[in-house]
Amino acid sequence: MREFDELQSHVLQRSLVQAGSAKDLMRTVRNQLLEASDRTKLSTPPQDVYGLVGLSDEFTPTLRKALQCARVALGAFVVTGGEKNRGRSKDLRHFKRSDGAWFDFSIVGRGYSGFVEILAYTYEIRLPVGHGAPFVRFDLNVPDGANQEGELRCHVHIGSDDVRIPAPTMTPREMLALFIDGICAASNRDGRTRTAFEHQWFAESHRMLAGDSGVDGLRERS
Amino acid sequence: MSPGTRPLEPMEFALRCIASQGAAAYLIYLASPADIASVFGELQDELTTALPEIQAVKSSSARQLLEAVAAHDANVPLLVDASAYDAEAWRLLDRRRSSLQRSGVTAIMTTTDSFDALMRHAPNLMSWFGGDVFAFPGTEVLERRHASLREDRLAALRAWSGLTDAEVLEQARAQTLPRDPEYAEWLVLLGRGDLLNA
């Protein structure tokens, strides 16, 4: 949408360059999750946090060892948190929040001498029933120099894979802070009473979903 | 790998050291001479992130270790490269073990040959480690684990998109690959970060 070109330019000016290597980034991400586990904001125990955070790069084993020996960190990488889970199955390994929300993420970047640049990311959190939407996902797509017009490179999906809303680029630290302490019900008051509009919307949405997959299909998935 | 040692990745050994912080703990981590330098560096990086106060000691002799221990507070975690220690060095440390007593974590890295010498010539010191003797599983083992995890993620991406690796690469070369972050990850896992076009 051309109307968002200026907004997108503004958003994408925010630097996603960080000092350090891909491993440093991975460890920083892991430590933030460990700290959240220590203060029981995450119910995922520390040893599981270690197992859930991973780092992959594009190198062959021989080249990787040579780079490690030379203490050089270059090339494209992906930091992962939890198993790849676009199907939203609770059977795949993920991080659990103490209120029942659960999430996973992946961050793609490129390492240079002394710094890394985040190129793309996806973070998705699934919320407890009654928290407004089944999931929230923040995506940063890979830049497309040839045709970036009209594309919302950085966006958020709230309860729908098909609806995109412009979102600011955020660092891994900011994203995880949002997922650990941010997207949640207010703790200082009871939930607001739902309006008649919301009741009707959810009821009609449920009928629509039941029609898409059949009532049995819904029961199996829930 | 020496009998009685348990294979652990560097990250897992670091986690054990971190979990032991706050008490007097002595742990040993073994690696082959070819891997010692890189694994020591890896451990140092892992431990420094969680325990910024940790001191790395690369001592070529037992006397240097004794001096290093005396120079730091007893509760500061220590990571020691003892790969150069021979029978004589371990005998000295066994006799002077009271000087090695500390209230913090002491993690010692060495080779299996040096560890054999420790067991034979420093029985009193050896008793401090108890069952806390671990070993780097080796680069090949780690690579196999890494490759397995990589393949799991690739399988998940294929199942999600319905595309094959070849189709993704073809679209990336033609610059028609969707810009979703999943495809970026796919290219990295295939070793084709050069096609990220960024």
Image (cartoon, rainbow, N blue to C red):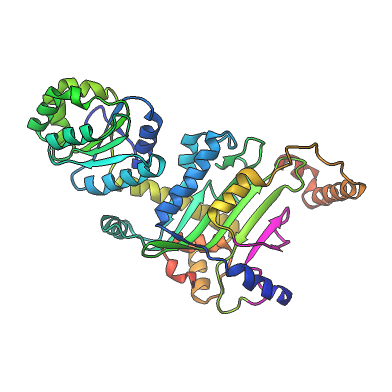
User: Residue A5: horizontal and vertical position, in percent?
Assistant: 68, 75
Answer yes or no: is residue B62 visible. yes
Going by the picture, which residue comes out furthest to the right? A196
Instruction: Using the rendered view, name the quadrant where residue A111 is placed.
Output: bottom left
Q: Is residue B1 left or right of residue A101?
A: left
Instruction: Using the rendered view, name the quadrant where residue B136 is placed.
Output: top left
Task: Say if B98 sits above or below B42 in the image.
Answer: above
Q: Is residue B160 left or right of residue A18?
A: right
Front residue (pair A142, B108)? B108
User: Over which residues does the magenta segment extend?
Assistant: A149-169
Q: How many marks?
A: 0
Front residue (pair A10, B176)? A10
Which image quarter holds the C terminus of chain A? top right
User: Residue B133: horizontal and vertical position, in percent?
Assistant: 27, 29
Residue B130 magenta: no
User: Residue B127: horizontal and vertical position, in percent?
Assistant: 22, 20
Going by the picture, which residue comes out furthest to the bottom? A146
Answer yes or no: is residue B178 visible. no
Q: Is residue B32 left or right of residue A95?
A: left
